[in-house]
Image (cartoon, grey):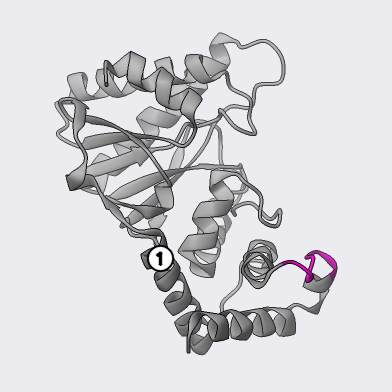
Amino acid sequence: MNQTERRAYLIEKLLDENPDARFAVDLRQEPRRVLRSLLNVRPPMPADPEFLQVQDAYLQEELCRKGITDVGSLTPAEPGIYLWKGDITTLRCDGIVNAANDRLLGCFCPCHGCIDNAIHTFAGVQLRLACAELMAEQGGREPTGQAKITEAYNLPCRYVLHTVGPIVNGPLTDRHRAALAGCYRSCLQLADRHGLQSIAFCCISTGEFHFPNREAAVIAVETVRAYRRETASGMQVIFDVFGEKDDEIYAELLGAD
């Protein structure tokens, strides 16, 4: 199968298993967006081996098309800490951090622009099922400031660390600040426990959760520096930014050119 044939197969299978998806997805979009939308609205449940084989081949081809950046090719902004502007779903490192919601199941909004949507889309349907199993075992929603770890499936990293950042509706408070710092510490601790040598952070809570970008960056950098200093951890930490605004803020804080 080529990519066009794989897309057609996956779209047909997704519509067959969930006919109601026709009412949640605009099928008039171009096929790539239709497929992403159908993957986004698919509930967490097992998929048959043939579907997974075709899906995985499709996602791996899409990854090759976008290109992979290896953490080894990056230049540190300071010892052990990196700043990189790019698509976190194309970064090859031990673990990437997902800014999740408290259900931990990914974004169900078709083709939404959040990082949660992108990570679940390009990891494949296996990731949502793995997260659902974690949440069923936990028996409740994920508390703010903690973290869970799963395999990364079709992403070039090895693991995804899922953390729920604070939602800021109104003035920023010390409680918001402490919760965001907790996200970074929880991810670093979890990564160390699992032997990860590198971890890439997105800008947690600064998108849909409305945490001010500069304040969030200051907390992120200070928390990572403190963790490395207090634990003597040799783990490489990458601050991954997607927009110019965050790139400028982190470059200033890290003294990067």
Residue placed most toward the observer, 5 or 104: 5
Residue placed most toward the observer, 90 or 203: 90
Q: Which residue is mark 1?
A: 65
Q: What's drawn in magenta, residue-wise?
A: 23-29
Q: Is residue 64 magenta?
A: no
Give coordinates of residue 226: x percent, y percent: 26, 18
Give coordinates of residue 232: x percent, y percent: 14, 26
At 21% from the left and 24% from the top, the residue drawn is 228
Q: Quadrant of residue 29?
A: bottom right
Name above or below for residue 142 compared with residue 16. above
Look at the numbered disc 1 and give the secondary structure of its residue.
helix
In the rendered structure, the answer to whether residue 4 lies left or right of residue 96 reads right
Give coordinates of residue 149: x percent, y percent: 40, 50
- Can residue 222 be seen here? The reply is no
Task: Give, as a three-letter code, the residue at label 1.
Answer: Arg
Main secondary structure along the magenta-highlighted residues? loop
At 27% from the left and 50% from the top, the residue drawn is 93
In the rendered structure, the answer to whether residue 254 lies left or right of residue 73 reads right
Give coordinates of residue 249: x percent, y percent: 42, 18
Q: Is residue 25 magenta?
A: yes
